[in-house]
Amino acid sequence: MSAELNRRAFLGSALAGGILAAGGCNGTARAVSEEPAWPEPPPVKIHKVYIGRTGHFYMSRPTEEIAKFDAYLADLEQKMGDVQFVGGEVVPPTAANEVVAKVKEADAILMFHLSGHGGGAPDKAMSQILDTGLPAVVFTQPFSGHGWMYFPMWQKEGKKVVLMPTSDWSELDRAVRLLRVPAKMKQTRLIAVGQPKGTKAATVPENVKTALGTEMLVWPNERILAAHAAVPIEAAEAEAQAYWFSQARRIVEPTRDEIISSARMYLAVRDLMIQERAQAITSSHCMGTPAKGCLTFSKLNDLGKVGACEGDVDSTLTMLLFLYAFGVPGFITDPVFDTAENALIHFHCTSATKMDGPSGKRLPFVIRDQSDSEQGVALEVENRLDQEVTCAKFVNLDTMLISTGTIYKVTTDELACRTQFWTKVEDADAFYHNWGAGLIGPDAVHHTMALLHRVVFYGNHMKDMERLGHLMGFKVVREG
């Protein structure tokens, strides 16, 4: 097999060089540098409110602290680029009902509990503002009084609030990233090509709109095929050279024409998404002809969009939630267990190459065929060892299944899909027996895929996903 791989690698390199020799893109990376601009949604409006006493007496924060918070948030607004802080009232002297009337124009609320004993004006005003139903974060520093002991009751009452009792102002960065998510989901358009698949609730566009505000468009595959045929072959050759031939470690099975056809599919899908102002796409036809969706979805995920295979709406929504919260793409996986190594093994034939996010470096990758069919174009991506990951899936539009692990081994077993890595988990046997936590029933559309698929993300996002659950009103269930 080694001799065969070496022969194919040589042929793949020759094919890549042939594109350059033919002048397909003049030896430049035009497709990378000339990516068109995607439509930008308006910034998320976050209404800031300061509640409690200021001044220099017992249980008061210094008056000048508000100006420091304002300066910190102004810097954060500039760094993030997609949020806008409004408001800034101080309660008292401003009455809470005046704030309530204003915050309804915003997408989220950030409240600073300055000081107060609790049971009085500060926490009553805060509770009144939370009753607007907008997602909110309450930031409380030490020595701000005793009111904090009432705040956890708000979560038990079902208010959409995250509580941050900390002296670390950098926690505000995390808070704001999470506050963006509900609004961004409402700004999102998702294209489902062919039959949407997943848990029953998630496959109905009206349900997705009601639960998350996300608009799901269901298209026939013929629209994608027509767009693919309309892409000029010269543009596809340039794209293939710039993003795939010139960057791959080697090419094994696919031919030059197959890779160019896959690049052509990416250009077709990209332009349709821009035209429709869509941020995500999933297709139940991604295993078909004239090109599989693997390279298309990989590059979309590299760019900070979402491309998800096999029409899996649950996984697509999971990828959107993590992307908006943490800026990282997801890897849809068909996992298996090895209890002998206390491992959950992840594998699939499409993967982002920028698993740290759009500004990160590309992971090493090999261009292969799709393993089940031994046809088309897929990716074998070499993931980073010792990388902590989060494994998740948003199911039934109301629950996030979640676990964590650490990558400790990368393999290329011919029995599995092309991209493979092994993760150490807390208790593989218990995880195996709790798979799905009894939440994915036989009424799911394509039940096997709905129960099997999970999405893996770089980083441990367990705590922040639990916080996001509070903000958006969904349950978070630790699966393993």
Image: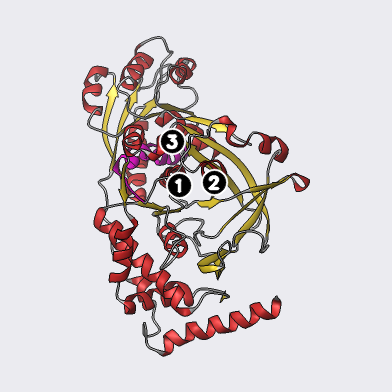
Residue 200: mark: 3
Alpha carbon of mark 2 to alpha carbon of mark 1: how far?
A: 8 Å
Tag 1 or tag 3, which sits nearer the N-term? Answer: 3
Label 2: few (<14), some or many (≥20) within 10 Å?
many
Image coordinates for residue 319, horizontal then vertical, percent = 45, 47
Alpha carbon of mark 2 to alpha carbon of mark 3: how far?
A: 15 Å
Numbered disc in front, either 2 or 3: 3
Alpha carbon of mark 3 to alpha carbon of mark 1: how far?
A: 11 Å
Question: Which of 114 and 124 lies nearest the eye of the viewer?
Answer: 124
Residue 312: mark: 1
Residue 453: mark: 2
State whether residue 393 appears in this view: yes
Query: Quick one: SS at disc 1?
Result: loop
Image coordinates for residue 284, horizontal then vertical, percent = 42, 52
Q: Residue at x 51, y 59 (%)?
A: 351
Vertically, is 249 above or below 326? below
> In the figure, is residue 360 to the left or right of 386?
left
Q: Amino acid at mark 3?
A: Lys
Magenta stretch in the rendered image? 171-193
Q: Residue at x 37, y 32 (%)?
A: 65
Q: Residue at x 49, y 16 (%)?
A: 149
Q: Are marks 2 and 1 in contact (CB under 8 Å)?
A: yes
State whether residue 460 appears in this view: no
Vertically, is 267 above or below 91? below
Q: Are marks 2 and 3 in contact (CB under 8 Å)?
A: no
Location of the C terminus (image quadrant): top right
Query: Quick one: SS at disc 3?
Result: helix
Name, please, the residue furthest toward the top. Answer: 119
